[in-house]
Amino acid sequence: MAASSTVEAERKFDADTSTPLPDLTGVKGVARVGSPATHTLEAVYFDTRDLALAAHGITLRRRTGGPDAGWHLKLPHSPGRRTEIQAPLGQMDTVPVELLDRVLAFSRGHALKPVATLDTQRTTYALYSDDDQRLAEFVDDHVVARPAHDSPAPQEWREWEVELNGAVGDHDDALLDAVATRLVQTGARPSERTSKLATALGDTLPPAKGSGREVPRPKGPAVVPVLNYLDGLLAKVLLEDAHVRMNRDDAVHQMRTLTRRLRSVLRSYRKFFKAAPVAELESELKSLAKTLGRYRDVEVLHARLRKDLDDLPVTLVLGPLQAELDERMKVRADTALAAVRTRLNSPRYFRLLDKLEAFLDAPPVAPEGTGPARKTTAKYVNKAAKRVAKRHDAAVGAAVGPSRDLAFHEVRKAAKKLRFAASAVESVHGKPARKMADAAHGIQTVLGEHQDSAVARAELLKLGSAPGVGNAAFTYGVLHAAERQAADAAQQEYLRGKKKARKLRLKK
């Protein structure tokens, strides 16, 4: 049986042993409470020697007993919610491959071993609506935790949980709030523990990644909003890594985008840090993005050329060109994807992740990064905006042909850097930074169409001039002309509609 995934929405509470069970029948939205179901559970938690999973808010356990026995992996999703992936019990010391792939970016090839065992006496009460739908579960747990490391005595506590049943949405928070209010009225206290494992590990639990970061303030250090933004980007990269390994649609594209964004922000604000560490990270991120990009570029080119062919009247398609294109692109895509997988399993990639985390945990801040955030970051965002305007002037003045295409591509790259630089400091500039990032994104999108056309035309020229192409050269010529028209249209759209976007600036 394959692993299954759900989003878990729950609230946790501490209760004394003597605290009476709450009466949940009168809670708004709850028509009746089901009969209690009691189970004895044993959960063995796995992690690396230095507790890398716990540091990222991840738990991996093998649970026996109860209706959901098996392997459970819980990943951060959003405040109050986690993604839970379950897999069959299998062997005690063998973590299922489908779960290993989801945490490899965190464990980085280090062995996963038992770090704690929790024995729980669990009593569950189902909560039902007027139409007898199961809305949620109230859980009363009596827990005994035994860490794998030396400990003077097992820890014991009582914990209450209320968890929504099935798919969740924002409207379900009202039910959680109502039940939570009743539990507090009964004598429970909102739990401060992040997980049962965190309580079991006690002082050995490492600090959460990204915790302790200063809140961005307009007059606070300029480096703070940038570091907070980089924290968020790296967290997304680590989660997207698993999606690439699982062949999720668009995952390579998303990971490439995040990698480029990390590099771009480091580049834009490089003077906030000492030069050598930033240069090293930039170089490695550029190389990783290039590896990811080869596969993504094939995806984009294949989809574009296939659509071009499909849109042509059949009388103009001379030969089995769709099938030939699909086969040719499949070979390229398979080769590029194999390179991605090799890279993501390499010590070089894991070292990059280690270095990124070390950089963010102890940032090598330069004097420029200590200046007032609003004023200092505005200077760098406006510098990026001026670069867009300068490259625009160069593109408009370029001779028609390949040099002009290249010049507009440079405008697009400058717009992308502006977008990321503005997004990184939205926490101190608010709406003006968001507006500037959106405007830059608009330029990037329009000129992205222009660049995709340029790449397609280069490919069509190769196809049309290849030995033995025969009558198909005519079809490729027709497609080349159509792509030229598409590029000209994108160029004109940019020139007509993006003048205001090039003039936006942040106030200091």
Image (spheres, helix red, strand yellow):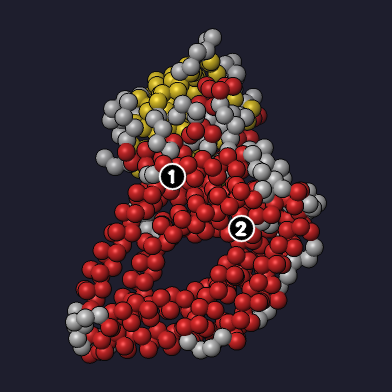
Residue 209, quarter of picture: top right
Q: In percent of the image, x 60 and y 18: which residue is there?
A: 16
Q: Residues within 10 Å of mark 2 (few under 14, many from 20)?
A: some
Check the picture and name the quadrant holding the C terminus. Answer: bottom right
Q: Is residue 62 visible?
A: yes
Residue at point 74%, 62% (across, down): 378
Residue 416 to residue 359: above or below = below
Residue of label 1: 348
**Residue positioned 49% across, 33% down in the render:** 52
The image shows residue 156 at horizontal and vertical percentages of: 53, 16
Q: 183 or 401: nearer the eye?
A: 401
Instruction: Provide the secondary structure element on which disc 1 rests.
Output: helix
Q: Is residue 177 among the parts visible in the rendering? A: no
Residue holding disc 2? 267
**Residue with the most extreme front position:** 276
Under mark 2, the amino acid is Arg
What residue lies at 27% left-to-right and 83% top-to-bottom? 465
Mark 1 or mark 2, which is nearer the start of the sequence? 2
- Give SS at disc 2: helix
- In this image, 137 relative to 461: left or right? right
Q: Quadrant of residue 361?
A: top right
> Is 391 on the left-hand or right-hand side of 90?
right
Instruction: Decide which of 195, 38 is in the foreground and name it.
Output: 195
Q: Residues within 10 Å of mark 1 (few under 14, many from 20)?
A: few
* On-image quarter of the N terminus: top left
Identified by mark 1, the residue type is: Arg
